[in-house]
Image (tube, coloured by chain):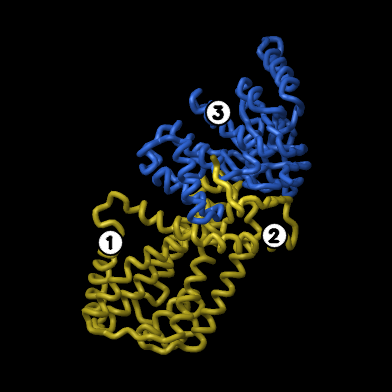
Chain colours: A yellow, B blue
């Protein structure tokens, strides 16, 4: 016989009408709250995504670790030689920057499919859209963790001590919530605009060179305030500088918080406006 | 109290891609019946138009109509997947959906993993999840296949899991699309027995199909849909007779 339980005897009410004005915001907020309540589901889905991607593969997720290691090793030695930089200071910087950028890049390019990639699920059962955004953010973070051993190895091999500050913890927290906002934002855009994924990929390609990732931000001093126009610079700097033992300037912190707030506001408003249409698009 | 209330429900799909411009001309002249324009003058396909009905506990509603009549869209709207463009959908009670053939299940995952995911969605505890798992396992009767990726299943096997799962989590309003009725006699017999238990607890069943035998056997009330509108709403026999007459008359050459 079907299972009974007390939690199932309540009768949930589904009441849907076209949204107007504040209704958009209210329903979007409810979606997000309910989605957060299903964090365990999002964790399972994100984890299974990774397990599936590597099912039947010999090294599985560690292919990623290896390719990161190869890239960091070759780029690090090459650029250190080309630009006459000390490997001991450059390589830790580069390894961390590359891995972190890989994570943010993945959140955004994969984010375009946060909803359109799970059309089957969306069309099969009603569930908060936030679950799909969380799933993507979680999956990206887990993949990012696979590359972290490379950073650790670089620090160990070069005998460099990483630094720790409480500010960095706040930075990580900010960055993590930002990845959720990014997946919501690009999930909506990607569901409506089919060309969003290639557009996002090429913009990220440009930002990769413009943002101080393979070059140190100290290289620019005159006009360094213009670097803050690139939202990724402060977002990366607030976790990178503390680890390298550098001081984060107040303006950098300010801009990081400002960009995060702006990102959440834009993501939320767009999501609120488009949430009820997502099922029609995917 | 468990119940369904659909009032003035309209659903339309905007045409964004591909041939939207070709349709725009026709829609402007009002030639093609199901194309229209929305408030922002976009060309839309009107999938459902001004649907009204309500269901009370114990109702077993059948949706009948040709392909593209709007049956699946109506089921999805009742499940809260497509939110209304106009009108209102109110569903009291826990909704169970059997809409897509894939049911939103991941074919790469095993039957058991898919069951666990669905249980997490409904917020079931560990104990409840293992109860559901056991229940589905018994109903689907797949033996060791439960732990294999679902892509290795025959369509009948995934159907058994899907049906078992949708009914195990005790829906009060069960929405089923016609594909589920393509099972063999053995499956249909078992499915019917299982559903009988659900309906006895004064729950609601909505089933779409063009199989007249199944509809007359399973349903107490029929809604006949065509072109996104309700043509007729009444008892099973009444509607089926009218539907058969129309189908028969359409086949005569004079109608063409």
Q: Are marks 2 and 1 on the same chain?
A: yes
Residue at 54% from the left image edge and 66% from the top image edge: A181
Query: Is residue B179 visible in this depiction of the protein?
Result: no
Q: Residues within 10 Å of mark 1 (few under 14, many from 20)?
A: some
Q: Are marks 2 and 3 on the same chain?
A: no
The residue that mark 1 highlights is A62
The residue that mark 2 highlights is A24
Q: Residue B197 location in percent, x, y? A: 61, 35
Q: Residue A262 location in percent, x, y? A: 59, 73
The residue that mark 3 highlights is B181
The outermost residue toward the top is B253
Q: Nearer the viewer, mark 1 or mark 3?
A: 3
Instruction: Please say if A135 is above or below A80.
Output: above
Q: Where residue A263 is drawn, which disc sits there? A: none
Instruction: Please say if A260 is above or below B175.
Output: below
Q: Residues within 10 Å of mark 3 (few under 14, many from 20)?
A: many
Assign a secondary structure to mark 2.
helix
Residue at 40% from the left image edge and 46% from the top image edge: B109
Assign a secondary structure to mark 3.
helix
Residue at 24% from the left image edge and 77% from the top image edge: A82
Q: Residue A167 location in percent, x, y? A: 46, 85
Q: Residue B178 location in percent, x, y? A: 58, 30
Q: Quadrant of residue A146?
A: bottom left
Q: Are marks 1 and 3 on the same chain?
A: no
Assign a secondary structure to mark 1.
helix
For marks 2 and 1, the one nearer the N-term is 2
As rendered, which of A143 and B26 lies closer to the eye?
Answer: A143
Chain for disc number 3: B
Chain for disc number 2: A
Instruction: Please say if B67 is above or below B20.
Output: above
Query: Is residue B12 visible in this depiction of the protein?
Result: yes
Chain for disc number 1: A
């Amino acid at each position: 016989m079907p299972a009974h339980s007390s939690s199932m005897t309540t009768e949930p009410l589904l009441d849907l009408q076209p949204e107007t004005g504040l209704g958009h915001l209210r329903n979007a907020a409810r979606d997000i709250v309910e989605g957060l309540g299903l964090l365990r589901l999002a964790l399972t889905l994100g984890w299974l995504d990774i397990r599936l991607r590597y099912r039947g593969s010999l090294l599985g997720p560690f292919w990623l670790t290896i390719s990161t290691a190869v890239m960091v090793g070759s780029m690090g030695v090459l650029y250190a030689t080309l630009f006459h930089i000390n490997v001991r200071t450059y390589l830790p910087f580069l390894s961390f920057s590359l891995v972190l950028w890989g994570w943010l890049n993945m959140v955004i390019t994969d984010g375009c499919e946060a909803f359109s990639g799970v059309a089957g699920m969306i069309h099969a059962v009603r569930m908060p859209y936030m679950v799909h955004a969380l799933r993507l953010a979680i999956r990206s973070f887990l993949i990012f963790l696979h590359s972290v051993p490379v950073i650790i190895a670089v620090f160990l091999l070069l005998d460099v001590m990483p630094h720790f500050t409480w500010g960095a913890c706040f930075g990580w927290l900010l960055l993590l919530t930002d990845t959720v906002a990014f997946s919501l934002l690009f999930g909506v855009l990607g569901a409506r605009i089919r060309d969003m994924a290639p557009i996002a990929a090429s913009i990220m390609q440009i930002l990769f060179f413009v943002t101080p990732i393979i070059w140190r931000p100290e290289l620019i001093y005159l006009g360094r305030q213009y670097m803050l126009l690139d939202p990724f610079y402060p977002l990366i700097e607030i976790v990178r500088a503390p680890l390298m033992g550098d001081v984060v300037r107040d303006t950098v912190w300010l801009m990081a918080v400002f960009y995060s707030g702006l990102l959440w506001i834009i993501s939320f408003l767009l999501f609120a406006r488009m949430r009820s249409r997502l099922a029609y698009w995917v | 109290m468990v119940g369904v209330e659909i009032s003035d429900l309209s659903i339309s799909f905007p045409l964004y891609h591909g041939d939207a411009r070709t349709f725009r001309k026709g829609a402007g002249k009002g030639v093609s019946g199901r194309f229209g324009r929305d408030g922002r003058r976009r060309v839309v396909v009107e999938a459902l138009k001004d649907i009204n009905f309500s269901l009370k506990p114990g109702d077993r509603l059948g949706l009948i109509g040709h392909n593209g009549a709007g049956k699946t869209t109506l089921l999805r709207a009742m499940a809260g997947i497509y939110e209304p463009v106009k009108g209102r959908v109110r569903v009291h009670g826990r909704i169970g959906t059997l809409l897509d053939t894939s049911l939103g299940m991941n074919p790469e995952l095993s039957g058991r993993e898919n069951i666990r995911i669905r249980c997490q969605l409904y917020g079931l505890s560990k104990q409840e999840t293992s109860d559901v798992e056991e229940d589905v396992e018994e109903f689907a009767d797949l033996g060791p296949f439960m732990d294999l990726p679902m892509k290795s299943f025959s369509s009948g096997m995934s159907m058994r899991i899907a049906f078992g799962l949708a009914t195990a989590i005790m829906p009060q309003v069960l929405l089923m699309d016609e594909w589920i009725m393509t099972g063999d006699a053995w499956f249909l017999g078992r499915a019917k027995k299982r559903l009988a238990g659900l309906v006895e607890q004064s729950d609601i069943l909505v089933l779409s199909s063009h199989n007249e035998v199944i509809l007359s056997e399973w349903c107490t009330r029929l809604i006949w849909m065509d072109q996104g509108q309700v043509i007729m709403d009444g008892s099973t026999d009444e509607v089926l007779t009218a539907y058969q007459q129309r189908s028969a008359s359409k086949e005569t050459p004079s109608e063409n």
